[in-house]
Image (cartoon, rainbow, N blue to C red):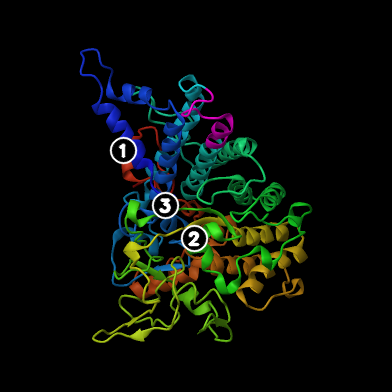
């Protein structure tokens, strides 16, 4: 979705400059709010502003500030620092030495989106007082319900991110409507934040019309169910998670197809490779999500409105980002050529060549391991570039530069939810159906399927599911949360950190045993702005 919140801000500015210059005019903060939320157009501009703020938070306002990656993956085994970079924020993430001065420790961007959602929830019911029912500017009951549902769902999504990144944090459910409103607040426990998100999503689900073909850029029925299932998985409440998985399966995709109709009827039932984007066109769901049976909720980043989506690690660009695909993942993902993708020789895993340049060498200084998952094009082997010491990944000749390309980052899609569902089934003892859903993803990717007998324990199968999620969802902001949710951070990251520390000549401590470090510190800026906020431990001495 385009960043239409500029329209909202422009409207407010026009109201401000057009105020009568009289001695009794009201203060700017009060007058502006009173002049807004009087019509359907105001509501839609505010709704666009809410989505725009969220997408700006996740993709970033400046080059390589894509927080979806820094928060959701950078601390995991998906990415590693390019050795030519010594940016403090990146170094801290690389060596698990986070401090309050890290630029990504600032949560205010998510609270800005929450503030917009709060204002919508507060003000949408008031529009009927200004625009009479049936008038061209009126907000119909159905529209009011839909917009209110989206605001509650967005608030829930933001609080879910906050709970997973910082653990404990403040909760605010009322908008700032007066300069005298109390802005400071103490942090609440993670469980209370998740409870707030669940309450928001329950109301959003009640208000949302069911069995409708959704717009993938908005939080509709399927997206609400996906977020709720994700939250219950985080809480290890597998029975409730399964309830919401089945509600998701009953919802419609942007193509009008029900995601998994038979899977909505009984636990473990249903599911077919036909539910998913085909393996040879796997990339389509990223470059054209509105036409994919898999899409649930995507960010819409339009380069004309938003500028370049120049993202660290996951962006195709001529500049060198601070991070690249990590060595363990680079060497672990099968690359044996046995299948075809279009007219090009592909790998055993049809996703590989549609994700990154497998011919890159580790010594390349610039386009090393080019990540092109979110871009359209024909993915061909690399070739030497005259006059340079590195090779360049080739695309179709008419492919626009990264600065002139729209990017549609998925927050939720069906294959990720199928694998999360497999994890839930495994946890409740239904190993056969867990493997069935795991195999749907493997079959679509063109890799060998597995049997339940191959896994000696729940943990073994869980590791297989998590590995498949790593291959399937890299770049989509989930790997770190997968490791935290399943308590596998030390198991996965300890050897990696030891290797990094050894190579750098640092003290070799590995990950350590302090699980409080799963969460980020609050940034110095946030601490200065909120005297009631107590720093997360073990960062309290910073």
Mark 3, Cα crowd under 10 Å, few <14 / some 14-19 / many 20+, is many
Q: Secondary structure at mark 1?
A: helix
User: Please, which residue is most extreme toward the top here?
Assistant: 24
State whether residue 110 is above or below residue 18.
below
In terms of secondary structure, where does tag 3 sit? helix
Rendered residue at 40%/45% (across/down) = 52
User: Considering only order in the chain, which callout, 2 or 3, is on the residue closer to the N terminus?
Assistant: 3
What label sits on residue 528 in the rendered view? 1
Between residue 11 and residue 424, name the one nearer to us: 11
Sooner in the amino-acid sequence: mark 3 or mark 1: 3
Q: Single out the mark in the foreground, 3 or 1.
A: 3
**Residue 403 magenta-highlighted:** no
From the viewer's side, name the closer residue of 83 and 5. 5
> Which residue carries the number 3 mark?
58
Q: Which mark is residue 506?
A: none
Q: Which residue is label 2 attached to?
A: 476
Which residues are the magenta region? 133-148
Q: Callout 1: few (<14), some (14-19), or many (20+) C-alpha neighbours within 10 Å? A: few
* Residue 220, picture quadrant: top right
Picture quadrant where residue 533 is located: top left
Total numbered circles: 3
The answer to whether residue 399 is seen in the rendering is yes
Residue at (50, 59) in percent of width and height: 480
């Amino acid at each position: 979705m385009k960043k239409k919140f500029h329209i909202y801000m422009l409207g407010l500015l026009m109201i401000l400059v057009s105020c009568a210059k009289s001695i009794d005019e009201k203060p700017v903060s009060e007058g502006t709010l009173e002049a807004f939320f009087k019509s359907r157009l105001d509501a839609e501009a505010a709704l666009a502003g809410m989505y725009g703020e969220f997408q700006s938070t996740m993709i970033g306002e400046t080059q390589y500030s894509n927080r979806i990656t820094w928060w959701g993956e950078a601390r995991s085994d998906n990415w590693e620092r390019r050795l030519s970079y010594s940016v403090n924020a990146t170094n801290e993430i690389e060596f698990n030495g986070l401090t309050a001065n890290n630029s990504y420790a600032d949560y205010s961007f998510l609270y800005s989106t929450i503030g917009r959602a709060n204002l919508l929830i507060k003000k949408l019911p008031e529009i009927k007082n200004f625009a009479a029912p049936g008038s061209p500017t009126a907000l119909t009951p159905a529209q009011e319900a839909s917009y209110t549902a989206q605001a509650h769902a967005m608030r829930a999504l933001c609080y879910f991110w906050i709970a997973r990144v910082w653990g404990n944090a403040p909760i605010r459910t009322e908008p700032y409507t007066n300069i005298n409103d109390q802005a400071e607040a103490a942090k609440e426990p993670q469980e209370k934040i998740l409870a707030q998100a669940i309450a928001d999503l329950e109301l959003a689900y009640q208000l949302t019309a069911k069995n409708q073909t959704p717009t993938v850029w908005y939080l509709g029925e399927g997206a609400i169910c996906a977020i709720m299932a994700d939250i219950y998985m985080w809480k290890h409440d597998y029975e409730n998670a399964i309830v919401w998985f089945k509600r998701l399966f009953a919802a419609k995709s942007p193509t009008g197809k029900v995601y998994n109709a038979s899977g909505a009827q009984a636990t473990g039932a249903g599911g077919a490779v036909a539910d998913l984007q085909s393996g040879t066109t796997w990339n389509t769901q990223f470059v054209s999500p509105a036409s994919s049976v898999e899409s649930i909720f995507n960010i819409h980043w339009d380069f004309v409105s938003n500028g370049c989506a120049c993202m660290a690690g996951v962006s195709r660009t001529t500049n060198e980002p601070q991070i690249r695909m990590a060595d363990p993942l680079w060497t672990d993902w099968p690359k044996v050529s046995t299948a075809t993708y279009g007219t090009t020789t592909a790998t055993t895993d049809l996703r590989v060549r549609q994700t990154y340049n497998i011919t890159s060498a580790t010594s390349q200084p610039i386009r090393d391991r080019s990540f092109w998952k979110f871009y359209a094009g024909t993915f061909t082997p690399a070739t030497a570039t005259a006059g340079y010491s590195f090779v360049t990944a080739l695309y179709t000749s008419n492919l626009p530069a990264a600065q002139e390309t729209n990017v549609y980052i998925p927050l939720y899609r069906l294959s990720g939810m199928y694998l999360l569902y497999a994890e839930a089934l495994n946890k409740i003892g239904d190993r056969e159906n867990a493997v069935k859903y795991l195999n749907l993803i493997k079959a679509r990717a063109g890799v060998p399927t597995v049997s339940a007998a191959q896994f000696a324990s729940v943990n073994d199968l869980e590791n297989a599911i998590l590995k498949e999620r790593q291959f399937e969802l890299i770049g989509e902001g989930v790997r770190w949360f997968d490791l935290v949710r399943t308590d596998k951070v030390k198991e996965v990251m300890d050897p990696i950190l030891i290797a990094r520390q050894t190579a750098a000549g640092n003290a070799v401590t590995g990950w350590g045993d302090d699980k409080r470090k799963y969460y980020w510190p609050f940034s110095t800026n946030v601490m200065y702005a909120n005297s009631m906020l107590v720093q997360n431990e073990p960062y309290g001495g910073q």
